[in-house]
Amino acid sequence: MDAELEHRYANVRAAMAEHELDALIVSGSEYSGFEGSVTYLSGFQIVHRYAYVVVPADGEPQIVFPTEARYVGEHGTAQLEQVFHDRPGEQLAATARDRGWRRVGVYGLDFVMTVRDYRALEGLDLVPFDAEFDLARAVKSETELESVRESVRINEEGFEAFRAAYEPGVTAAAAMAPAEEVFVARGCGRLTMNMVLVGPEFAIAREETRLGDFVLPSLEIAGPGMHWVEVSRALGRVPAEVEPMVEAYREYHAAARTAMRDGATAHDVHRAVSQGFTERGYHLGHVTGHSIGMTMIEHPRVGEGIETVLREGMVLSMHPHAIAADGRACLYMQDTWLVGRGGGEPLSRLPLQVYPD
């Protein structure tokens, strides 16, 4: 196990000890954004099906696959013992009973673990551990930050490709295709989830969708290191009803540089960055922001009443979704930020503006 992986296990086991867990089961699946938890603890990237990493408080971890998934990725990259079983839940339950585990945490209990495996764990004291696991991995190591910055550079290249292809009347698919070519060429593989906003709604970039004079792309990718980032800017002619939203975005960006500091709460950051929007009477549709890493959306969310304390080295995706009272006009731009000791650092070099400006 390399030093980076040992560092990650130390973080996770510290969280386990705090909650008196005998073991932790970390669930991952092929659904984009949910495979990163397994990669974080094993080095293995799921290509198909699902897998679990079993982390005992003491002893060596394992990665458990369903037998039908004998090949679901480059198995040589896994730095753990690999176990295959027709019904992985039965394997997990048998291991727990053989080792006398009482309290077993589960990451992915609500959204990732398969029903058949959950049923096999009946009788164990299962502890939902989504937020705790995410917080244990929220502060990024220097190695992880290198991966994050590489993802940001790739995302920026993709935005420039989208920008070069965009003109009023072009199809959403035609504008997005050059960006996706960049992402695949730079090693993202299938770890992209890129859309456009049609009105305030997110939509797949389809051939039948014609883009107008003002476009809001949503670009979300993970580079070769599998760290997700989100960077995008609006394009085109700003409608008059959107101009105040652009000014509110500038205010959010300035506020985040101060508010996004070690020791602030997610609630504090939300209040600071959303003030310019709420004072102008806008609704905020999508979540203001969230922690982001090898899973696309991690805890904590940046929002009202979220009292999680931010720490230096956390990476947050921020994207206030301003929607006018009529529910039609909106503005949505994405940035990936690094929480610093005295304030936030936007990791993208792209100026916060509507292109062309």
Image: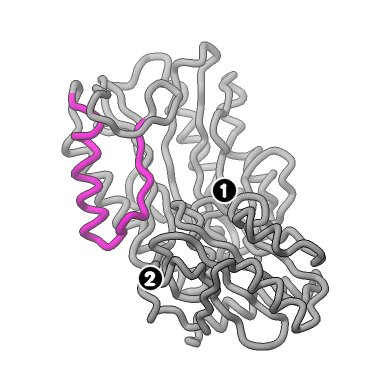
Q: Earlier in the sequence, mark 2 or mark 1?
A: 2
Residue 87 counted in the magenta span? no
Q: Residue 153 — which label?
A: none
- Residue 351 showing in the rendered view: yes
Q: Residue 71 — which label?
A: 2
Say which residue appears at 48% left-offset and 70% top-offset: 67
Say which residue appears at 36% left-offset and 56% top-offset: 152
| Residue under label 1 | 290
Say which residue appears at 26% left-offset and 20% top-offset: 212
Residue 172 counted in the magenta span? yes
Between 89 and 111, the one lying in front of the other is: 89
Between 90 and 314, the one lying in front of the other is: 90
Q: Position of residue 154 (x, y in %)?
A: 29, 56
The residue type indicated by label 1 comes to: His
Q: Look at the numbered disc 1 and give the secondary structure of its residue.
A: strand
Question: Compared with residue 268, is residue 328 higher up or lower down, i.e. above or below?
Answer: above
Question: Compared with residue 325, is residue 30 higher up or lower down, i.e. above or below?
Answer: below
Between 226 and 311, the one lying in front of the other is: 226
The residue type indicated by label 2 comes to: Tyr
Q: Position of residue 285 (x, y in %)?
A: 55, 28
Chain part drawn in magenta: 170-196
